[in-house]
Amino acid sequence: MDKAELRACLEQADSKEAGALLRAALRNKMREALMEIFEEEVQGLCGPSHSRDSKSDYYRAGSSPAKVKLGATKGCDQRGQCDQRGQWK
């Protein structure tokens, strides 16, 4: 939902519905921010996606589920993983 749609919904909602809409919008923005942080961390360690820098100590190693509790709900997304070269899991 973009800003214009959210604003239109808020104008028509009562206070209880407006609160629920704002909480949902805030959860979505928080989830997006966390996913950006996860990606920045992986890029900082491993470099850009699909790069083959053999000088780096780390490399991309797939993804894993990321569970984050935002308010009363739990969100689940995929986050990238890094492994250190020469290390085995």
Image (tube, rainbow, N blue to C red):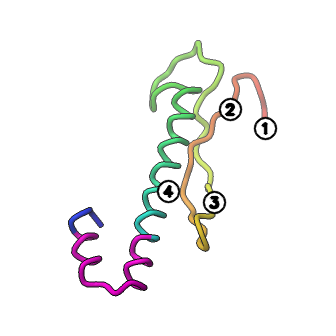
Give how far across and how far down residue 45 sits, in percent: 59, 26
Q: Amino acid at mark 2?
A: Asp
CA gap, disc 3 and disc 4: 10 Å
Say whether residue 17 is magenta: yes
Identify the secondary structure beneath mark 2.
Answer: strand
Q: Are marks 1 and 2 in contact (CB under 8 Å)?
A: yes
Mark 4 / mark 1, whichever is N-terminal: 4
CA gap, disc 2 and disc 3: 20 Å
CA gap, disc 4 and disc 1: 28 Å
Q: Which residue is mark 3?
A: 67
CA gap, disc 1 and disc 2: 8 Å
The residue at 37%/79% (across/down) is: 18
CA gap, disc 1 and disc 3: 21 Å
Mark 2 or 4, which is nearer the eye?
4
Say whether residue 13 is magenta: yes
What is the magenta range? Answer: 5-22
Q: Amino acid at mark 3?
A: Lys
